[in-house]
Structures are given as C-alpha cells and as structure tokens.
Image: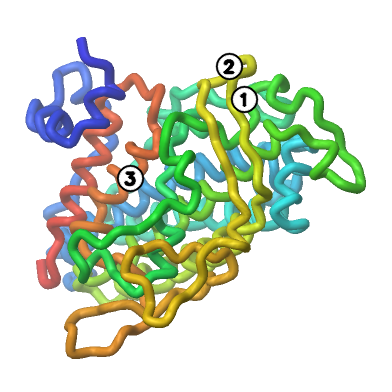
C-alpha cells in the first residue's frame, strides 16, 4: 500500500485521495473536527458574515495551529526561556549558541514569533466561537515524534522539523523585478539550492547533533560545522514559513465580505510580514560551510551555505532571470503588477489564489516535509478540505 507521504507528495494522488471521501472509521474524527458553518449564521446578529468568511477564518485557525506547533518546537530549544511561552524547560544552550551566529538576539526573536503564532490561533478560535461557528481542533493529530535533545519537552507534534526540503526561492523573488503572479514562467533562483534537495533537520534531533560543540567567546570556532548547519537551516526555514503567511493573508482578504473579518485579516497578516522581514535579514548572515548529515539519525543530505553578502546584486537594467541574491537587499524590489502599463511597484507577492491561496499554502507545507510521519490520513483530508472551502469563498457569499 502506498505510504501517506507518497500520496501527499503527488498532486494527482492528492486529488484522488480527496475524492475517495472519508472512511467510516475516520468519519467520527472528521465530523467532530470539521463541523460546518452553521445554517443559522445567516439568521443571527452577524448577518453580514458569510459562509465564505467563516470558511476563511476556520482555515486560518487551523493553519495558525500548525505554525504555533512548529514555533513552539523552535522556542523550546532555541528561544528565551520564560513562562510567556508555556512548556519551555531551559532550552538547548548549544543550539541557541549556534543560532546567535546569525544574530545575537535570535533567542528573543524566536520566543516572540512563537508567542505571536500562539496568539493568532487563540484569537481566531475565540472569534469564530463568538460568531456561533465551530473552531478547528488539530490536537488529535499531534502524533509525530519530535526532538529528544536537551531542552525539548518530548511531546508529540503536528509538524516534523527534522526532514525538511526547504524552498528558498523566496530569496530571489523579493529581490527580482519579476512577479510569479504577473510573469508566467519567471525563474527564481534558490537562495540555498542544497536545502531544496534531500531532507534536512532544523533542530537537534538528539544530543548527538550537539556533541563536540561548546560555548565560547567565538562560537564560530567552538560549535561544530554540523550544529551550525542545523542552525542556519532553521534560519532559512523561519523565513520560508513566514513568507507564506505574508502572501496568504492578503490573498484571502480579497475574498472576504464582512468588514470586521477583513479587519481581522488585514491586522494579523502584516505581523507575518514583520516576521518574514526579520528572518530573511538574519538568514543572510549564515557563514559559508558544507555539512553532510551522516551522524546518528542522519538523513545523508548535504547542505552548502555560501556567503550571500557577496552574492549577485542589482544590475542596470535589472535582471529578469531571478538571480539577484545579495543578502542585504531585504526590502521588496519594485515588481510588475496588474498591467504592463503601470510602472513596477514594491508589493507583497504572490497574492493570487493559484500561487498563494489556501491550497497552495497547505501544499507548500507538504512539500516542505512538515507532515512526514503523520500516519492519520484524515489530517490532510481535513486540511485540504478546509483549504478548498477557503479558496472557494467569494465576496458576498
């Protein structure tokens, strides 16, 4: 029988997978988790909130739980350890030290990003329930084993941070005049090509990944190349996750009817952009190195980081090859938008349902490897169904 991972990696298989419906055994879970936008919604005090608005909010509620889950893992191991983010237990000093090579404040940034995502999920749940709609509860699907390294709580997770295949094309997309929504077939180079090949861990899986490292006044020399590679992988993964939210919220906002719901999306979405801006700045500080993950529990993947501060910068005329990679070009380059008769403009991109809608967001997480190890088929049925309903929402419906 095909594995869940095989089914979810192939778009054709995913479509067939969805069409097969929910089996009798899974239906009980699905019914409780999915719920539905109540028919009474059109009769209650919030007459202007449509079923489409509720579908969008329910999808975002689910997606923010996924983001909270992965950020909690990062915070347990590499964030500031205080009671604002519950469950932390001292962190992993060696991993935290490796992260500080990217920036001395990384632990605080990780902590605060985690706190933000937890707040997004909690707010969306409360808001949905205040409107008489059922929120989504993904906790029954937290079945993926996580890290057992020092600092981890050892809880079961919704997400897997140890077998990632990270798409770093966002790096060139925001440095390019071309726009995936406007320029079909436009090329966008990977910021770290090797991260998009094989499976890479962004956290220490066990203490074997930190073995041989120690903290010093110069962590670049006292922390092993292997642990530095794990930390640098995390840096690019942080940016990958948050650029997705940066595009998702304005994409779905275009389909909202109710003005208060629109305000919710327009208020949460920019915080994702603030996260992305921070993380792509810090990722650019990764030092040049090559590491092969061939130790205990390793995947055998090779990763090579280059000095992006010395990468190709802006040209005149601007390159349309998507190959501008200079690290400090963190402001969005003006790009094509809406019509050729308009000049390039600095914008969030993409913002189309095809490239950055709900289904695209879930598929991006699947391709990233976040759900490898999830054995319950109902999980992805649920996520893609929520995504379908959100993408199908239209203003006025």
Please indicate whether residue 264 sits to the left or right of residue 54 in the image: right
Indicate which disc, 2 or 1, sits on the residue closer to the N terminus: 1
Q: CA distance from mark 3 to mark 2?
A: 25 Å
Q: Position of residue 355 (x, y in %)?
A: 24, 57
Q: Position of residue 148 (x, y in %)?
A: 65, 22
Please indicate whether residue 269 sits to the left or right of residue 362 in the image: right
On-image quarter of the N terminus: top left
| SS type, badge 2 | loop
Relative to 165, say whether 20 is above or below. Answer: above
Mark carried by residue 297: 2
Indicate which disc, 3 or 2, sits on the residue closer to the N terminus: 2
Q: Which residue is mark 1?
A: 205
Q: Which residue is mark 3?
A: 364
Please identify the quarter of the rendering in which residue 149 is found.
Answer: top right
Q: CA distance from mark 2 to mark 1?
A: 8 Å
Q: CA distance from mark 1 to mark 3?
A: 23 Å
């Amino acid at each position: 029988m095909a594995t869940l991972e095989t089914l979810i990696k192939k778009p054709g298989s995913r479509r067939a997978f969805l069409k097969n419906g929910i089996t009798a055994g899974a239906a009980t879970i699905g019914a409780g988790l999915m719920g539905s936008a109540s028919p009474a919604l059109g009769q209650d005090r919030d007459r202007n909130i449509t079923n489409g608005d509720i579908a969008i909010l329910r999808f975002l509620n689910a997606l923010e739980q996924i983001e909270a889950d992965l950020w909690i893992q990062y915070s347990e191991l590499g964030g500031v350890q205080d009671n604002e983010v519950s469950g932390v237990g001292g962190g992993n000093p060696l991993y935290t030290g490796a992260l500080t090579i990217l920036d001395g404040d990384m632990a605080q940034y990780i902590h605060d990003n985690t706190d933000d995502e937890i707040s997004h999920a909690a707010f969306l749940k409360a808001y949905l329930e205040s409107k008489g709609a059922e929120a989504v509860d993904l906790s029954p699907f937290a079945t993926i084993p996580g890290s057992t390294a020092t600092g981890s709580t050892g809880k079961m997770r919704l997400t897997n941070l140890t077998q990632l295949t990270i798409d770093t094309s966002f790096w060139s997309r925001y440095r390019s005049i071309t726009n995936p929504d406007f320029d079909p077939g436009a090329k966008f180079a990977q910021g770290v090509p090797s991260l998009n090949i094989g499976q890479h861990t962004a956290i220490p899986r066990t203490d074997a990944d930190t073995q041989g490292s120690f903290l010093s006044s110069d962590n670049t020399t006292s922390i092993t190349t292997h642990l530095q590679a794990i930390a640098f992988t995390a840096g690019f993964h942080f940016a990958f996750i948050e650029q997705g939210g940066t595009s998702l919220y304005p994409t779905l906002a275009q389909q909202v009817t109710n003005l208060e719901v629109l305000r919710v999306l327009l208020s949460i979405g920019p915080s994702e952009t603030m996260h992305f801006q921070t993380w792509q700045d810090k990722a650019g500080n990764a030092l040049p190195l090559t590491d092969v993950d061939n130790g205990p529990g390793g995947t055998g993947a090779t990763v090579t980081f280059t000095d992006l501060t010395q990468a190709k910068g802006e040209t005149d005329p601007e390159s349309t090859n998507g190959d501008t990679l200079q690290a400090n070009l963190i402001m969005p380059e003006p790009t094509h938008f809406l019509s050729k008769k308009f000049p390039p403009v600095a914008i969030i991109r993409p913002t189309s349902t095809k490239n950055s809608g709900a289904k695209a967001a879930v598929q991006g997480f699947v391709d990233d490897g976040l759900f490898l190890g999830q054995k319950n088929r109902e999980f992805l049925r649920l996520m893609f169904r929520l995504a379908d309903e959100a993408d199908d929402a239209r203003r006025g419906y």
